[in-house]
Image (cartoon, helix red, strand yellow):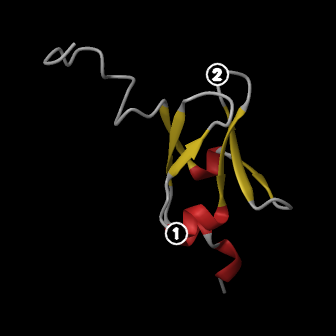
Amino acid sequence: APGGGDDDDDYDDGHYDEVELDEMDFDEAAQLYTYPCPCGDLFQITVAQLLAGDDVAACPSCSLTLRVLYDVEEASDDDAP
């Protein structure tokens, strides 16, 4: 309800949850990070999306989204010395 404010503890900016990048599973072949979605599918975000500054992983089977917490350096480990 507008002005309520009591029910937004679990919902920040409309995202289902926030997850650290290192908590996600990485598919090296697909260059894709995934995380289990409550609907049974997987939230997905690509390395390219992360490098472009996109921090929202979407589930292809439902409308939920996940905010990914990361540093750009973390996403581009390949460039590390």
Q: Nearer the viewer, residue 61 or 33?
A: 61
Q: Which residue is mark 2?
A: 38
Q: Count neighbours of disc 2 (C-alpha within 10 A) and say few if under 14, some if 14 to 19, many if 20 or more.
A: few
**Residue at the left extreme?**
3
Mark 2: secondary structure: loop
Which amino acid type is marked by label 2?
Pro
Q: Which mark is residue 52?
A: 1
Q: Is residue 53 above or below residue 38?
A: below
At which x and y percent is residue 53?
47, 65
Q: Quadrant of the C terminus?
A: bottom right
At which x and y percent is residue 20?
54, 47
Q: Is residue 9 above or below residue 77?
A: above
Q: Count neighbours of disc 1 (C-alpha within 10 A) and say few if under 14, some if 14 to 19, many if 20 or more.
A: few
What's the CA distance linking mark 1 and mark 2? Answer: 27 Å
- Residue positioned 63% across, 44% down in the render: 23
- Residue positioned 49% across, 59% down in the render: 54
The earlier-in-sequence mark between 1 and 2 is: 2
Q: Is residue 41 left or right of residue 45?
A: right
Q: Is residue 72 left or right of residue 1?
A: right
Q: Is residue 17 left or right of residue 46?
A: left
- Residue positioned 73% across, 23% down in the render: 40
Q: Quadrant of the N terminus?
A: top left
Q: Quadrant of residue 32?
A: bottom right
Q: Nearer the viewer, residue 81 or 46?
A: 46
Q: Which mark is residue 10?
A: none
Q: Is residue 71 above or below residue 81?
A: above
At which x and y percent is residue 59?
64, 36
Q: Nearer the viewer, residue 17 or 54?
A: 54
Which amino acid type is marked by label 1?
Ala
Mark 1: secondary structure: loop
